Every structure is written in structure tokens, then in C-alpha cells.
Amino acid sequence: MENRRKLVKALSFRLFDLPMLKKAAAMHYTSRMEMEDAARFGLTNLQRVIPIGIDLAPFDSLPPRSVFSAHFPETAATRNLLFLSRIDEKKGLDLLIAAFAKISPTQPNTRLIICGDGDPALIGKLKTMATAGGVADRITWAGQVTGELRLAAFSAAELFVLPSHSENFGIALLEAMAAGLPCLSTDQVALAADAVRDKAVLLAALEPAAIAAKLEALLDSPEQRHLLGQSARILARCDYSLPAMGKALQNLYREVVKN
């Protein structure tokens, strides 16, 4: 029982409580990035990376694209790039909009769909930026989407983009991977930094030109999109399902009890 109590502490730790961390029987991280970040504490207890799992069943059979285009008709016949997340400075939407403006002359049938809510002042700033870049009429601001409409957003998209400056995991990216979308992100997104090892996510540097170059390369290569999307779908089901997470946690509990 003592080991189990220590494990509970480990699973709900706060990084600023170093004495508690040192007394924990084990440390559970959701990504390699978290574990590497915690290395500065010099912990010697059991260290394990167990990713967050999600219910993948909704992604096995997505609603048709028409469900989304019924709400946003302008997306029906375009090649859509999808951003789906909370709208915040750290999400890199300014970089994405600037990158989209760079590729728009050579990709005239593309549209950027932005799903999510955030600070109205920031959204206003981003819309002003889109206008200045000449792409305001090619961006759909869908707001927060839920339920069937959220799932249909993945059906409507050809690519998923999450150019964040910082993400301790990245649930929206995992959902896009589960949907089989080719995904572009950065090495500051913990899930992306792990998934790139399996060629399941493409990474770009945190600047518009790099993001634009990767977007253009993906849009021009059906084969690369297919391979990236297939790898993403397979990885999501192998490593990021609820059963996979449950099995890994069970193994960790057994290790703790044994020790």
C-alpha cells in the first residue's frame, strides 16, 4: 500500500514540489519532452513515459465533409488547411497566417480553416494581419466546434497544422493523427516531437518561411500526404489509444508494487 500511495503522488506531481518528487516511487510523464525537462531535478526514481490515450472510435468513421460545408459553404470545393485549438499567442497562428499568405499565390484553391475561440483582441489582431496579407477572404473563422461538427472539420481538411511555440502534449494534434490527416507541427509540441520519430508528423521551424515551404511541399505531393497520414493513423492506434494507455499504466503499477 505504501508503494501505491507513492505512485498516486507521482501521478499528480507538481514540478515545484521537489521533496515530494524525490519521495515518489515513480514518475509518469506524458511525453519524452516532459521527462527531459524534469531531468534537471536529478531524480533517481522509476521514470516512465506513458502518453495520453483518447477514445479512437469516433475517428474510425468520420462524418462526411458535407456536414462541415453545410455550415461553411465556402469550404466545400477548396483544399482546406485546418487549425483546431484554443486561440492563444503561444499557438503560432500569426506564423500560420503569414505562411498561408506566402503560399496563396501559387496555391489559389487553398483555404485556411481556423476552429477555436480565444481572446477577442487577439482574434481581431490576427484578422487584421490576414487582411494586410491579402488572405482575409480565404480564411474561415469557424469558432469553437463540438460534436459532429468538430469531427467533420477533420473530414473537410486536407492538412492539419499546429505551429505552437509550446505544448506539453497536443490533444488536437492527436485527434488529427487519429483521423488520418497529414500533420505539420513544430518540435515545441511534445506529441509532434515524439511522433516525428515514426514519420507520423512533419516538423517545421517556428517562422513563416519554413512553415510555408513545408505546406507547399505537402500540397504538391499526394504521395507524401498519403504516407504521412497513414503513419499518423497507425501510430495513434498503436500508442495513443485508451487500451494502450491502460496497459502501460498497469505495467507501471506492477513495477512499483514489485519494487
Image (cartoon, helix red, strand yellow):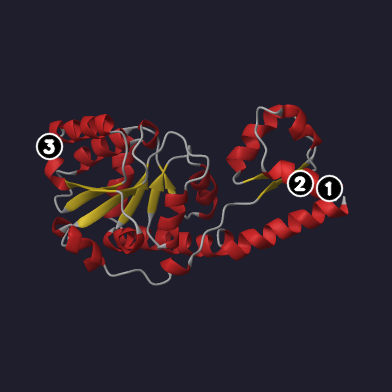
Q: Report if residue 128 is visible in the image.
A: yes
In terms of sequence position, does the residue under pointer 3 or pointer 1 come before the other? 1
Res. 239 image quadrant: bottom right
The answer to whether the residue labelled 1 contacts the one labelled 2, judged by CB atoms less than 8 Å apart, is yes
Q: Secondary structure at mark 1?
A: helix
Q: What is the x, y in percent for residue 106?
A: 16, 46
Label 2 environment density (alpha carbons within 10 Å; few <14, some 14–19, many ≥20): many
Q: CA distance from mark 3 to mark 1?
A: 60 Å
Res. 127 image quadrant: top left
* Amino acid at the residue labelled 2: Leu
* Amino acid at the residue labelled 3: Gly
Label 3 environment density (alpha carbons within 10 Å; few <14, some 14–19, many ≥20): some
Q: Report if residue 27 is visible in the image.
A: no
| Above or below 73: residue 137 | above
Identify residue for label 2.
7
Judge left or right: residue 251 versus residue 209: right
* Amino acid at the residue labelled 1: Asn
Q: Secondary structure at mark 2?
A: helix
Res. 258 image quadrant: bottom right
Identify residue for label 3.
134
Which residue shows up at 34% across the image and 52% down it? Answer: 160
